[in-house]
Image (tube, grey):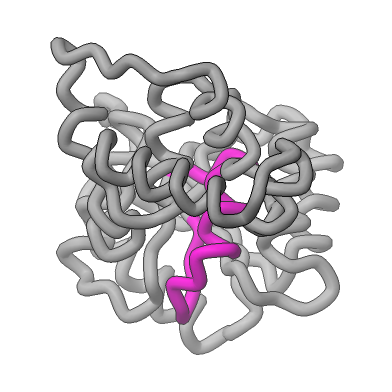
Amino acid sequence: MKPNTKNRIIIVDDHQLFSQSLELLINSFKDFEVINRFENGKLFVSYLQDHADANVDLILLDVNMPVLDGVSTMKWIKENRPDLKVIALSVNDDEEIIIKMITNGAKGYLLKDTSPEIFKEAIISVIEKGFYFTELVSGMLVKKANNDSKKINLKEKEIVFIKHACTEKTYKEIASEMCLSPKTIDGYRECLFDKLEIKTRIGLVLYAIKNKIVLV
C-alpha cells in the first residue's frame, strides 16, 4: 500500500445505483478513494486519452455495458495502457467472458454479489500482488501450478493446445486448427486438467499466464 497516500480507483459501470454504492463502500475503506466514475467504456477511454498522465491505481470495469463493453474496453487498455490494473465486475461467471477478460489483461474477476470483505481483499491483492482470482471463478486455481518447486513437463502438442485454449476458439475449432479429431482434443483437455490439477478452461488459462506460456 502507498505510504501516507490513498490508492486512487476509477469505476466504469453503467448501473448508477451500483456504481454509487460501490463508491461509498470503497471510500469507507482506509487508504482508498474513488476519483472518478464512468457509465461506459467509451467515456472512460476518452478520459484516458485526454489524461495520459492520469494517476490511477486500479480500474473496476463492468463487463456488460452499452456503447463500449468491458471486453472491448479491456482490449483497448491492453493495447494502449497495459500498465493499468483492472478488476472485471460481472453478474455472471460465464467461462468464455472470463477468459476473454483475463487474456486481455484483467488482473481479477469478481461477481457483483461478492461480499464487502472479499471485495476489499481483492482490491488490496491486485494493487499489492498484481492479481486476484476466487476459486469460484477459476474452478480450482492450481495446486501444482502454485508449487514452484515441482516441475511439470508438458509435451509440445500440449503446449500448442494450451495456447489455443487461451484464445476465443471453441474446442472444435482448436481440433481443426491442430488437424486432430475433436475426440483427441477432448483427450488433451482431460489429460491436462488431471496433470495440472485444475477443473476448468479458466484454470488452464491462468496456468498458462502464470507460467508465461502466453503473455498478457
Horizontal side of residue 7 vs 48, given as left or right: left
* Image location of residue 178, percent across then percent down: 71, 36
Of 80 and 147, nearer the camera is 147
Q: Residue at x 25, y 29 (%)?
A: 145
Question: Image quarter for residue 104?
Answer: top right
* Image location of residue 175, percent across then percent down: 68, 48
* Image location of residue 186, percent across then percent down: 49, 53
Whether the magenta-drawn stretch holds residue 105 is answered as yes
* Image location of residue 84, percent across then percent down: 58, 35
Which residue of the protein is positioned furthest toward the bottom in this rendering?
17
Up/down of 182 relative to 125, above or below: below
- Quarter of the image that includes the N terminus: top left
Q: Residue at x 23, y 57 (%)?
A: 135
Of 58 and 165, nearer the camera is 165
Up/down of 11 relative to 21, above or below: above
Which stretch is magenta?
Answer: 88-107
Q: Residue at x 50, y 72 (%)?
A: 94
